[in-house]
Amino acid sequence: MSGRFENGFEGRVAVVTGGGTGMGREMVLQLTADGCDVATCDISEENLAETAALCAAAGNKGQLISHIADVSVESEVLAFRDVVARWRKHVNLLFNNAGIAQGYSFVTGERADWDKTFAVCWFGVYYNTRAFLDLLIAAPAAHIINTSSINGFWASIGPARSHTAYSAAKFAVKGFTEALMTDLRLNAPHVHASVVMPGHIGTSIILNANKIFGREPKEMDAEQLILERERLTKFGLDVSAASDEDLRVGLQALAEGFRDQAPMTAKDATAVILEAVRHDKWRILVGEDAKILDEMVRQDPQGAYSIEFFDKLNERGILGGLTGGLAAQPPATP
């Protein structure tokens, strides 16, 4: 077994948050397939059970334990940490992956939505990093991998939609991770850190968020549907002729389309992330859209939120055409 991870993850111990779906599930699957023992948490017992069943069916050689925890609640994170500490004496890899998407407008949105989104996407990273730090330091080699987003360097999903809570949280994750690199080098040099910035990845983030916030299209009541009609009208979509049932079907199709029509699957995105960790990369852009957007923002930071910038993105064919359909969709990261 090598000093760090260039030869893979066999015999190591990893913690993965949000392991019930999307990239979190793929991290659990690919790590255990490589012989890594994994502890994962999620808010959904059903989703965790499905992840465990997939690992078992594949015959993955790494061991797996699962725990129900909301990463935005520190007491639940600490309880998860305690379970892991009783299971293994140290942790080599911490994947702070869990995230949700709501709280779009700071001006007109519900504060509870904003606060919950920020808490999961930022405090989930902060709480877990604090909780597991001693176990990471106890390992001979360790790595913290924090999932930010393209919205960690560009706070937008198009000119027709506010996007404040998620973007603010993902900027915080990126800044924290970059600052942590120096802190670790000075005080725990065998622990490294990476920030992951995916573009549009095929995950169930919209579907999951709808469940968490009680807005599953099939369950929406009359008042929620009125609000959805107002929201879609603001995006320039005429839904006046659509029945309530048509609207429910359309909203469900949007959420499923975000997952199923993405340019990159969660499986492929996870493979990119794990390969970058093997090579000790600290800055991990995932997907061609992330790479192109990073290049464009660096070239024109002053104009990055102008209508002309969105038009250039559309011309390059990335992110689904931000002046069109994606402007009405939640953010692009799991």
Image (cartoon, helix red, strand yellow):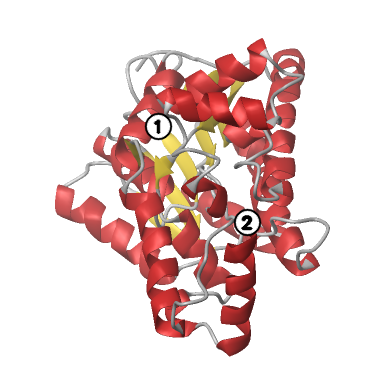
* Label disc, if present, on residue 12 of the rendered structure: 1
Query: Residue at position x 54%, y 63% from top?
Result: 209
Give yes or no for contact between labels 1 and 2 (Cβ–Cβ under 8 Å): no
Please name the amino acid that badge 2 sits on: Val
Query: Residue at position x 74%, y 36% from top?
Result: 172
| Nearer the observer, 271 or 279 | 271
* Label disc, if present, on residue 50 of the rendered structure: none
- Disc 1 or 2, which lies upstream in sequence? 1
| Nearer the observer, 121 or 57 | 121
Crowdedness near tag 2: few (<14), some (14–19) or many (≥20) residues, C-alpha within 10 Å: many
Above or below, comparing residue 60 to residue 72 in the picture: above
Q: Percent from the top left, x then y, of residue 200?
A: 45, 38
* The quarter of the displayed image where residue 144 is located: top right
Q: Secondary structure at mark 2?
A: loop
Q: Percent from the top left, x then y, of residue 240?
A: 52, 75
| Nearer the observer, 216 or 208 | 216
Above or below, comparing residue 139 to residue 123 in the picture: above
* Label disc, if present, on residue 71 of the rendered structure: 2
Which corner quadrant holds the N terminus? Answer: top left
Crowdedness near tag 1: few (<14), some (14–19) or many (≥20) residues, C-alpha within 10 Å: many
Query: Residue at position x 72%, y 55% from top?
Result: 119
Q: Percent from the top left, x then y, of residue 47?
A: 38, 64
